[in-house]
Image (cartoon, rainbow, N blue to C red):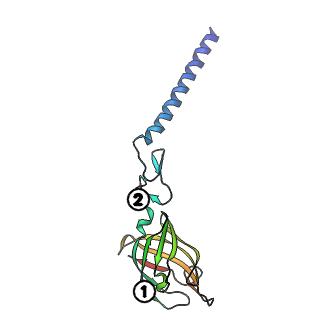
Amino acid sequence: MKARFKIVILSALGALTAFSAVTFSSCNEDKCKAITCAYGGVCSDGQCLCASGYEGVQCETITRQRYLGTWHVTEDGTFSNAAQYPISVEAGPNITEVRIKNFRNNLINDVQAYVKGDTINIPSQQVNGNSIYGFGYIVDDKYYGVNGKIIIRYRIKDSNGIVDDYGVDGGEPSLWNK
């Protein structure tokens, strides 16, 4: 009798364990059942995990869109005088890339940069005989609104070896406002 009771109890526990596993896994699957993620995003545990270059609840927004447009730059480097000028940020060939036109108010060719979320990265590059690199982030601004300001820290070294620093190792960062 004891052996039979033991078998019944073990069978009941086994059935309960199997039922719990099926119920638990089906609940997890149900969290993503009604969710559609755009642009190659994947649903995991009820939330979209976005591919690089996209953001939003359902990956519906192209990240670089926040950076595109005309910006008004105010800056004062360690070598140059204070300056104010417009720049234009345009879409690059891949989804995370942007091209900055009129960088530093004197470069003929575009400066290449990459965006990821709230950050922008200017990889080390040669533009019109100048070595440039930098980084920054986009923020909300009380006067210019949502994503109305970019704070950029960069260094530029000209063909004569003169370094102008905008907040990397010295000087103040460059401020870009919409």
Percent position (x, y) of residue 6? Answer: 62, 15
* Vertical relation: 139 (above or below) 156: above
Q: Earlier in the sequence, mark 1 or mark 2?
A: 2
Q: Residues within 10 Å of mark 2 (few under 14, many from 20)?
A: some
Circle number at residue 14: none
Percent position (x, y) of residue 80? Answer: 52, 90
Q: Quadrant of residue 31?
A: top left
Q: Secondary structure at mark 2?
A: strand
* Vertical relation: 112 (above or below) 170: above
Return the residue at label 1: 84
Q: Is residue 108 left or right of residue 69?
A: right
* Vertical relation: 53 (above or below) 105: above
Disc 1 marks which amino acid?
Gln
Q: Nearer the viewer, residue 54 or 130?
A: 130
In whole angstroms, how far apart are the C-alphas of marks 1 and 2?
Answer: 31 Å
Question: Which quadrant: the N terminus?
Answer: top right
Q: Nearer the viewer, residue 174 or 115?
A: 115
Return the residue at label 2: 61
Percent position (x, y) of residue 89? Answer: 43, 74
Percent position (x, y) of residue 151? Answer: 48, 75
Of all residues shown, which one is farthest toward the top? 1
Which residue does the image show at 51% across and 29% down from the upper left?
A: 20
Q: Nearer the viewer, residue 161 or 15?
A: 161
Which residue does the image show at 61% across and 10% down from the upper left?
A: 4
Q: Secondary structure at mark 1?
A: strand
Disc 2 marks which amino acid?
Thr
Question: Which quadrant: the C terminus?
Answer: bottom left
